[in-house]
Image (cartoon, coloured by chain):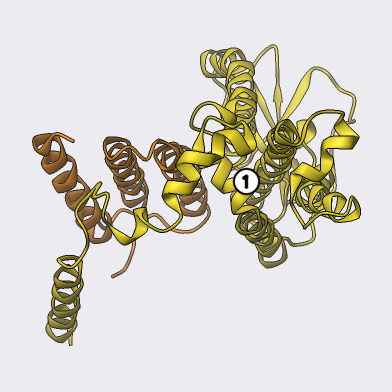
Chain colours: A yellow, B orange
């Protein structure tokens, strides 16, 4: 059976490789892909949208509908992770508390717990106990810069590679880094579950809302030139601004979804103890 | 595009892909998958698709590796097949 599988894999792999022989050469100007709409985008996108990065102009303006539903795909990925994994939080068998000055760990059986406001003790996870001052401090120093870079990537997507998706992922990674180096509860204290869900929806809402606003202003859906009278600029600059609004929406949604998937996966849906 | 670089990166992509599916340790497979994504990212960058390379580096090599590690941490580390 294994041999048969191997033969089939090699047969179809060979067929696929054979199929690629018909592809046009890399960077061939006469290839079908670069003859249809590409020349128009390359020649006109700067004067139509005033965005120097053609990829951003195509992604968020000419093909804005695609990107809207890409964002919806990410949103539904987060949603399905939530519905598959999230379970009701049950009180764990035993809680562990570390006494901060001495480092002694207390084990408290089910039902009992230390008073919430105690500053001498810190609750720790039962499986994995990260307590490394060097790692924590390094990450505390790093995280603001990572977040700043993420904002830069979102805002500078017009001029350089980047945009909502990449910036959102980097922003989410900063929160994940915080949750890994401290613990999941600390991370959730910074960005709670309810906030995450609201932000997920808010991102998609901003994107679709900008599109619907264009519709109300008597233009096509996602035709940002309609925003010109609202923003008080000419239609070309309005398209550039519209792309920025949309990218911000994408960034918020992606950031929230990445953190939501991480928290649900690492705590098996309990959102309590985790990696 | 320099063909020597291309050849080296492409063969590393294939090595990483084969290693990722054949290794028994799932944590190792997750890390190999991250390495695979990073090689793909280099390949995109070499071909001039910088936006795609950026996405591959942040999503493929960054966050998805973390999600794999989180999943391995919550299931088993060794595979049976």
Helix, strand or loop at label 1? It is helix
Q: Residue at x 49, y 58 (%)?
A: B75
Along the viewing direction, whichever of A66 and B8 lies nearer the viewer: A66
Confirm whether residue B64 shows in the render: no
Quarter of the image holding residue A121?
top right
Q: Residue A234 at what x, y percent from top left? A: 78, 31
Residue denoted by label 1? A60
Q: Residue A72 at what x, y percent from top left? A: 68, 59
Residue lying farthest to the left in this orientation: B4
Along the viewing direction, whichever of A52 and A268 lies nearer the viewer: A52
Considering only vertical position in the picture, is A6 above or below B16? below
Quarter of the image holding residue A73?
bottom right
Considering only vertical position in the picture, is A165 above or below A35? above
Q: Residues within 10 Å of mark 1 (few under 14, many from 20)?
A: many
Q: Residue at x 61, y 22 (%)?
A: A152
Q: Residue at x 76, y 48 (%)?
A: A207
Q: Residue A270 at what x, y percent from top left? A: 72, 54
> Where's the N terminus of chain B, which quadrant?
top left
Confirm whether residue A62 shows in the render: yes
Q: What subunit carries mark 1?
A: A
In this picture, residue A189 sits left or right of residue B30: right
Q: Residue A200 at what x, y percent from top left? A: 75, 49
Along the viewing direction, whichever of B11 and A217 lies nearer the viewer: A217
Q: Residue at x 83, y 18 (%)?
A: A119
Along the viewing direction, whichever of A28 and A141 lies nearer the viewer: A28
């Amino acid at each position: 059976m294994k041999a048969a599988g191997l033969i089939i894999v090699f047969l179809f792999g060979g067929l696929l490789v054979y199929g690629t022989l018909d592809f046009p050469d890399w960077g061939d100007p006469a290839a079908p892909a670069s003859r249809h709409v590409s020349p128009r985008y390359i020649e006109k996108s700067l004067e139509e949208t005033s965005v120097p990065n053609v990829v951003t102009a195509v992604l968020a303006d000419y093909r804005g509908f695609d990107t809207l539903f890409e964002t919806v795909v990410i949103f539904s990925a987060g949603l399905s992770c939530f519905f598959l994994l999230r379970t009701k939080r049950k009180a764990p068998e035993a809680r562990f508390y570390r006494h901060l000055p001495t480092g002694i760990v207390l084990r408290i059986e089910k039902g009992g717990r230390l008073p919430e406001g105690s500053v001498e003790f810190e609750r720790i996870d039962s499986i994995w106990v990260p307590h490394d001052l060097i790692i924590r401090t390094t990450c505390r120093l790093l995280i603001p810069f990572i977040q700043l870079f993420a904002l830069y990537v979102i805002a500078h997507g017009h001029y350089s590679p980047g945009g909502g998706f990449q910036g959102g992922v980097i922003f989410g990674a900063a929160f994940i880094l915080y949750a890994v180096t401290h613990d999941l509860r600390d991370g959730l204290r910074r960005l709670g579950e309810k906030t995450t869900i609201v932000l997920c929806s808010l991102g998609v809402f901003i994107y679709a809302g900008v599109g619907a606003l264009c519709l109300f202003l008597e233009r096509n859906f996602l035709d940002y030139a309609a925003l010109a009278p609202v923003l008080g600029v000419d239609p070309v600059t309005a398209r550039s601004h519209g792309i920025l609004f949309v990218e911000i929406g994408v960034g918020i949604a992606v950031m929230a979804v990445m953190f939501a998937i991480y928290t649900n996966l690492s705590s098996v849906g309990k959102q309590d103890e985790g990696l | 595009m320099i063909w020597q670089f291309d050849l080296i990166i492409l063969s590393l992509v294939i090595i990483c892909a084969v290693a990722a599916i054949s290794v028994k340790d799932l944590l190792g497979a997750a890390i190999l998958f991250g390495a695979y994504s990073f090689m793909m990212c280099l390949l995109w960058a070499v071909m001039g698709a910088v936006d795609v390379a950026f996405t591959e580096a942040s999503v493929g090599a960054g966050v998805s590796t973390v999600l794999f590690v989180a999943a391995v941490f919550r299931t088993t580390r060794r595979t049976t097949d």
